[in-house]
Structures are given as C-alpha cells and as structure tokens.
Image (tube, rainbow, N blue to C red):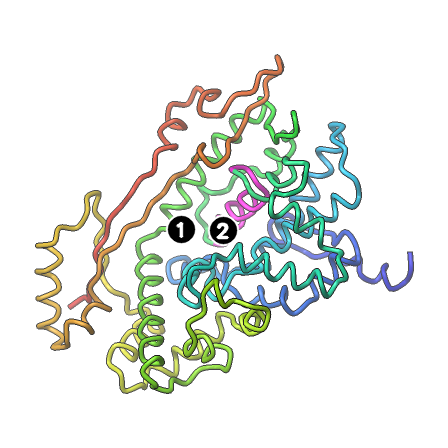
C-alpha cells in the first residue's frame, strides 16, 4: 500500500458508534468531495431544533453512520458464508454513503419547494452519475445496487427496505440528538441477526423482539420528532415563505439572496430541465443560503414575506390544532374570517397564514417490502404473522392526523 493511500485510511470519532474507520482511499476521496462536504450544512431533521435543543445534527453525520453500519453488515454476512467480494463491499459502502447526497436545504422540509417534481433520491442518483464520470467509472457497481438493477437483490435491500442501514442509523441518531429515548433502537443487535436466504435479506428469529422494538420505535419517533406539531407548523411556514418568495420573484421583484438561491427563485426547475449544470448550482445550496436570505427578508416591504421571515427567525410560530377528522369548511371559514379582520390583509395574503393540511404515519408498510423472519425450521414469515404482538399488526395501518394553522392573537 502506497503512503498516499495509507494517509487516507482515517478514523472518525462518532458520538453514536465510537470510532468509524474509512475503509479505503476511494471512499475517503468521495467524503472529501465538495458535493459530499455540503451535507455538513444540511440539517438532518429540518427545523426540529426549534423543538429539541440538540437536534442540530446534519446529513453528513447520518451518511457516515450509515457507512459504518454497512461495514458491520458486510462483516456479519461474511461470517454467515454470504459471499461478498471486495468490489461489492466497496460498492455497498459508496451506495449507502451517497444515498442522501441529493437532499436540499432542511432535508425533507423543502423537498419540493426548491425544485418541483423530482425527489431527493433522483437528485442523489444524478450526483452519483456525475461523480462516476469524475472518478472514471468507479461508482458504476454502486449505482447499479442503488437503482436495484444488480443481480443480487439483497444488496439493494441493505440500501433501501423496511430494515435498511438508512433507517437503522437515522432512528438511533435522531433519538440521540433529540433526546427522545423511545427511538433508541439496538441497530447492532439487528445487524448481527441479519442473513440472506434465496437472495433475500432475512432476520433470524432470535432478532424478532429487536425488530418489534424497531417498528414501535419508528412509530414513536415519527409522532414525537418528525411529525411533532411544532416542527410541522415551522416547516409549513418555511414552505409558504418560499412560495411567496417564488411568487414575488416571478413578478420581477428582486429579493436579496445568494447567487445559487436566486437562480432557483427566478427559474422554475423541475424533472424535465434538471440537467448537469443545474446540478452544479444545486450543489452550492444549503441551509445557510436559506437562513441568510430569510434574515434579510425581515426588512422587506412585502407584508407576507417580512412577517413569515420574522416569525421563523424569532420562533413566533403559528398556532396549530391537530384533529383526528378533517377540518370542516365552516370551522376553517370562521377562523379565516376572524384572523383576516384582526390583521386587515387581503384573502390572498391571509392564505399564507391560515391553512389546513394533514400528516400520515405508517410504522410498517408490508406492501413496499417486508421484514422477513427466518426460523430454525427454515420457514420464512413476515413479521406481522411471526410476531405474537398484536400491536405490530396494528402498526401496519396508516394513521392520519388533520390540522389547521392560524396566527395567535
């Protein structure tokens, strides 16, 4: 091994798993790339830090954690005589390391506000293809696995399934940084119980209780962190703020913002025109562009833009009411009329401050992929049938909550 490569085998200290080794020089170079370093400036859980004091961790933390868990999974499967070549292992590390590289500012909060009709997974794939050209085809196998086109299906399941390395990291990590202990799943135990049967990822029956806790933990983390009502209203306000900024920009109003952010405010970018040049501009955009612009917009002449900007920066959030049934038209109309009279603004302006929507939580969706339990008698069963916990069956049903947001007095 050359001195150059030796220097690239760094060790990172992670508060969740302790020391994480970078497995080879190619992975090191990908981590060092500006596209990946941008993830240091992308919040992992949107505006959840307005609820949980410590939730300031980033997509960079998460991606490194996922890579570490993938290393553990590869080691575990190899000890169970699952053949994984060094090239396949490296491809798995790359695929999971870059699986979230397409996230824009504040992650899911602004997923369809900066660009429309294109998911972060599709942008991640665009980044991976761009990097593959730069790294002379060394990411080709990783891209095949990421897209689910590689002949060994279980490898894609390690990247994207009901029990993938992504979920095993983000639940544990978001639990740690938010302080919500209910999400603290035993990801190491779950990985140690993984196996492959007929090219499908399975969980040995000894891991069934850890899997039950994983599903319950996922449900609790969604209601307590990802769909916490204060976080939801803050993110909806941020989406409305960008909608207003886009509307003003389309009318020729010049809004102070970074060059990259101004580009997306002035252009309608969607799947059809998202090319490599736009990808390079997107790569210059992060949370800091958005926050810096919002601070400037507080002093703008437009009432909606300045008011929403001030409310977000100073955490003066709208009131939110959660209901189990859809908000009635009569209730919405009465709130809308009352608040419009209070603020003395137009109906169109009021629509940014009074609105209804819904959130949905499905802890386990067997229609997408299954957590298959592998018994000693070689029988394989979906966890909802294998588990003696009735609540696991109940958690397969989506739960919907409806809400209305409006200004406090």
Q: Is residue 174 magenta?
A: yes
Q: For the stretch drawn in magenta, what is the main secondary structure?
A: helix
- The residue located at (24%, 81%) in the rendering is 303
Q: Quadrant of the C terminus?
A: bottom left
Q: Position of residue 29 (x, y in %)?
A: 74, 63
Q: Nearer the viewer, residue 301 or 249?
A: 249
**Image quadrant where residue 25 sits:** bottom right
Asked whether the residues under the numbered discs 2 and 1 touch, taking CB atoms below 8 Å apart as contact, a structural biologist would say yes
* Residue 22, quarter of picture: bottom right
**How many other residues sit within 10 Å of disc 1, few (<14), some (14-19) or many (≥20)?**
many
Q: Residue 219 appears at what percent x and percent y?
A: 40, 40
Q: Which residue is mark 2?
A: 174
Q: Earlier in the sequence, mark 2 or mark 1?
A: 2
Regarding mark 1 in the picture, which secondary structure is present there? Answer: helix
Stretch in magenta: 162-177
The residue wearing badge 1 is 225
Q: Does 41 appear above or below 175? A: below
């Amino acid at each position: 091994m050359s001195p150059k490569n030796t220097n690239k085998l760094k060790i990172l200290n992670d508060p969740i798993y302790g020391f994480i080794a970078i497995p080879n020089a190619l992975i090191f170079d990908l981590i060092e790339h500006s596209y990946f370093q941008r993830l240091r400036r992308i919040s992992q859980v949107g505006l959840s830090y307005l609820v949980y004091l410590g939730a300031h961790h980033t997509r960079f933390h998460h991606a490194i954690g996922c890579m570490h868990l993938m290393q553990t999974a590869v080691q575990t499967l190899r000890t169970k005589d699952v053949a994984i070549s060094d090239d396949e292992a490296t491809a798995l590390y790359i695929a999971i390391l870059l699986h979230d590289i397409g996230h824009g500012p504040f992650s899911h909060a602004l997923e369809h506000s900066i660009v429309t009709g294109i998911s972060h997974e599709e942008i991640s794939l665009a980044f991976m293809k761009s990097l593959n050209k730069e790294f002379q085809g060394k990411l080709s196998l990783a891209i095949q696995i990421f897209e689910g086109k590689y002949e060994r299906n279980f490898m894609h399941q390690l990247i994207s399934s009901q029990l993938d390395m992504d979920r095993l990291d983000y639940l544990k990590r978001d639990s740690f940084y938010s302080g919500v202990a209910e999400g603290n799943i035993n990801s190491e135990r779950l990985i140690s119980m993984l196996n492959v049967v007929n090219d499908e990822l399975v969980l040995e029956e000894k891991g069934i209780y850890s899997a039950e806790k994983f599903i319950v933990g996922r449900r609790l983390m969604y209601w307590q962190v990802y769909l916490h009502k204060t976080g939801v209203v803050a993110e909806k306000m941020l989406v409305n703020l960008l909608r207003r900024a886009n509307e003003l920009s389309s009318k020729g109003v010049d809004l102070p913002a970074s060059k990259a952010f101004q580009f997306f405010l002035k252009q309608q970018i969607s799947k059809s025109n998202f090319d490599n040049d736009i990808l390079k501009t997107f790569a210059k955009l992060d949370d800091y562009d958005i926050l810096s612009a919002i601070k400037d917009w507080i002093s703008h002449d437009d009432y909606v833009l300045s008011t929403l900007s001030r409310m977000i920066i100073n955490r003066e959030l709208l009131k939110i009411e959660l209901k189990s049934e859809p908000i009635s038209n009569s209730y919405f109309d009465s709130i809308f009329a009352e608040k419009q009279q209070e603020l003395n603004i137009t109906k169109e302006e009021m629509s940014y401050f009074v609105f209804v929507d819904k959130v949905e939580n499905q802890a386990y969706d067997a229609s997408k992929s299954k957590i298959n339990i592998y018994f000693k008698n070689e029988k394989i069963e979906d966890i909802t049938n294998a588990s003696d916990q009735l609540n696991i069956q109940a958690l397969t049903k989506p739960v919907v909550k409806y809400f209305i947001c409006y200004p406090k007095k």
